[in-house]
Image: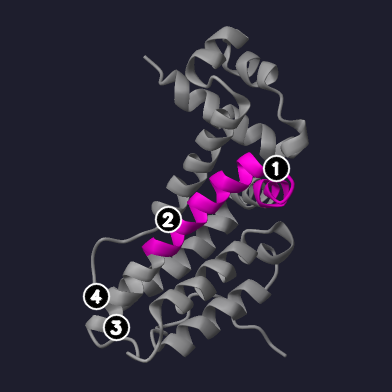
Amino acid sequence: MKDRRSELVLAAYRQIAEKGFEGLRTREVAAGVGVNIATLHYYFPTKEKLIEGVVEHAMQRFRSTLEPHGSPADQLRAYLRAVRRLLQVEPELGAVMGELALRSSRDPALSQVMAGMYELWHVTVRGLLKRAAKEGALKREYDSDEVAAIIVSTLTAMSLPTVSGGRRGDQALLQLERWLGIAGPRTTPQATD
């Protein structure tokens, strides 16, 4: 049996990616999955709860890039590169995150959901940084909280379609790797200036 809740979240996710946040219609989400609106409301009593499901799905896509193996520096480097690949392979992820971020500035309920998501993301990256510093792979004078904020901000900017399609995101990630002292072999094409 299919997981109806996941199907509804994916339908809403795709609708936001294609039509923007303003184009999200719960009746269309339900119809796209082949259920009635009452069934959608059984799983998601409010539109906000459905959007929370979309945010959780997006964050799961980002969490899927975390490697549990290797040194903390290798994990951090792999994470930065995997997020970049994820945004290239799944451009709808950037579209959804961009839509939700923009809408959250005008929607207090969504703002709370997004703030929670960003906090969890920040804590995850900060944990990677702390482990890398403890192992001696990062300079101890770096404040892991501030560096995590820089990384999350960079990755957030890269999720925006106007940034993710260009080489600026590659440049930002490569510079972050060099600055953190975790640069390894380059896996992206070299730009000529």
Residue at numbered disc 3? 133
Dot 4 falls on a residue whose secondary structure is: loop
Q: Which picture quadrant has residue 74?
A: bottom left
What range is drawn magenta here? Answer: 99-124
Closer-to-camera residue (3/129)? 129
Task: For label 1, count other residues whose C-alpha is less than 10 Å away and answer few (under 14), some (14-19) or many (20+).
Answer: few
Decide whether residue 105 is among the magenta residues.
Answer: yes
Q: Residue at x 46, y 27 (%)?
A: 6
Compute the Cα span from label 3 to label 1: 38 Å
Majority secondary structure in the magenta region:
helix
Decide whether residue 85 is among the magenta residues.
Answer: no
Compute the Cα span from label 3 to label 2: 20 Å
Q: Looking at numbered disc 4 in the image, what kind of residue is underneath it? A: Ser
State the image coordinates of residue 183 (x, y, percent, origin top left): 42, 85
Compute the Cα span from label 4 to label 3: 11 Å
Q: Vertically, is 33 above or below 137?
A: above
